[in-house]
Amino acid sequence: MSDRAPQTWECPTCGDRLNFEILDDERFLVAWSCVLCGPIRTTEPV
């Protein structure tokens, strides 16, 4: 077990590296996905 906080590019579930894809560059919409465990999240500035 590690005491360090997860990095933004690490999956919060399994710790594997996240992949990202830019969905809309005008709105800065990005999809983050984990190949190992499968969750997909999107981020967009407010």
Image (tube, rainbow, N blue to C red):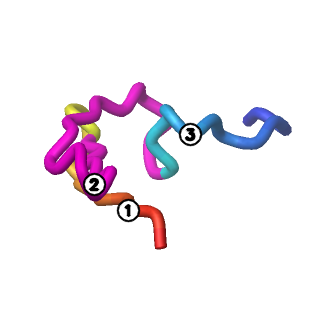
Q: Is residue 26 above or below residue 17?
A: below
Q: Mark yes or no: residue 8 visible.
A: yes
- The verdict on residue 22 being magenta is yes
Q: Do the CB atoms of the residues marked 1 and 3 lie less than 8 Å apart?
A: no
Q: Do the CB atoms of the residues marked 2 and 3 lie less than 8 Å apart?
A: no
What crowding class fits label 2: few (fewer than 14 Cα within 10 Å), some (14-19), or many (20 or more)?
Answer: some
SS at circle 2: strand
Residue 13 spot, x, y in % from top left: 45, 51
Residue 42 spot, x, y in % from top left: 29, 59
Q: Mark yes or no: residue 41 visible.
A: no
* Apparent side of residue 17 relative to residue 31 in the rendered image (left or right): right
- Residue 18, image quadrant: top left
What crowding class fits label 1: few (fewer than 14 Cα within 10 Å), some (14-19), or many (20 or more)?
Answer: few
* Residue drawn where x is 28% and y is 48% of the image: 30
* Residue drawn where x is 25% and y is 43% of the image: 33
* Residue drawn where x is 28% and y is 58% of the image: 27
SS at circle 1: loop
Question: Can you tell which mark lies on residue 44?
Answer: 1
Q: Do the CB atoms of the residues marked 1 and 2 lie less than 8 Å apart?
A: yes
Residue 22 spot, x, y in % from top left: 21, 39
Residue type at numbered disc 3: Thr
* Start-end of magenta stretch: 13-33
Question: Can you tell which mark lies on residue 8?
Answer: 3
* Residue drawn where x is 81% and y is 36% of the image: 4
